[in-house]
Image (cartoon, helix red, strand yellow):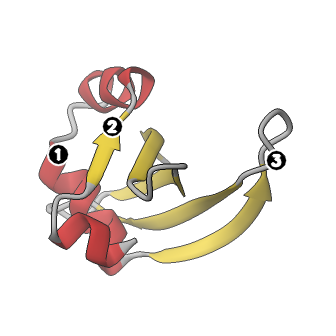
Amino acid sequence: MRDKVRTRDYIMRVHADEEREADSLTVLDVEHCILSGEITERQRDKTSKELKYRIAGTTMSGRAIEVIGKIGPTGKLVIITVYLF
């Protein structure tokens, strides 16, 4: 996932973008979480059966953030949602 962020091989779902804006987060905050955070849980999506990952980390300013993402069928990282915690 880190390589996908480094090469900008990811997409952010509309929901994730809306949540990011609602929490006053930047795209750099989301990228920072993925690049420096840790996977805290692997979950199986109930509908698609795909694996998705909870990544806990920090924003550029050090606030606690969590990103939920998965590798989509095209091989891109799909950022499902983001939130402060």
Residue indicated by mark 2:
12
Q: CA distance from mark 1 to mark 3?
A: 27 Å
Q: Are marks 1 and 2 in contact (CB under 8 Å)?
A: yes
User: For the residue carrying disc 3, how many other residues have a C-alpha within 10 Å: few (<14), some (14-19), or many (20+)?
Assistant: few
Count neighbours of disc 2 (C-alpha within 10 A) and say few if under 14, some if 14 to 19, many if 20 or more: some
In terms of secondary structure, where does tag 2 sit? strand
Q: Amino acid at mark 2?
A: Met
Residue 48 percent across, percent down from the top left: 77, 39
Pointer 1 or 3: first along the chain:
1
Q: Which mark is residue 49?
A: 3
Q: What's the amino acid at mark 3?
A: Lys
Q: Is residue 80 above or below residue 42?
A: above
Question: Which quadrant: the N terminus?
Answer: bottom left
Whole-percent x and y of residue 9? Answer: 25, 58
In primary-sequence order, the first of circles 1 and 2 is 2
Q: Looking at this rendering, what residue extends furthest in the front direction?
A: 74
Badge 1 is on which residue?
27
Q: How many marks?
A: 3
84 with respect to 69 (left or right): left
Mark 3, mark 2: which one is toward the viewer? 3
Residue at the spot 42% in from the left edge and 45% down from the top edge? 79
Q: Residue at x 22, y 39 (%)?
A: 25
**N-terminal of the two: label 3 or label 2?**
2
Q: Nearer the viewer, mark 1 or mark 3?
A: 3
Name the residue nearer the viewer: 53 or 85: 53
Q: Amino acid at mark 1?
A: Val
Residue placed most toward the observer, 27 or 48: 48
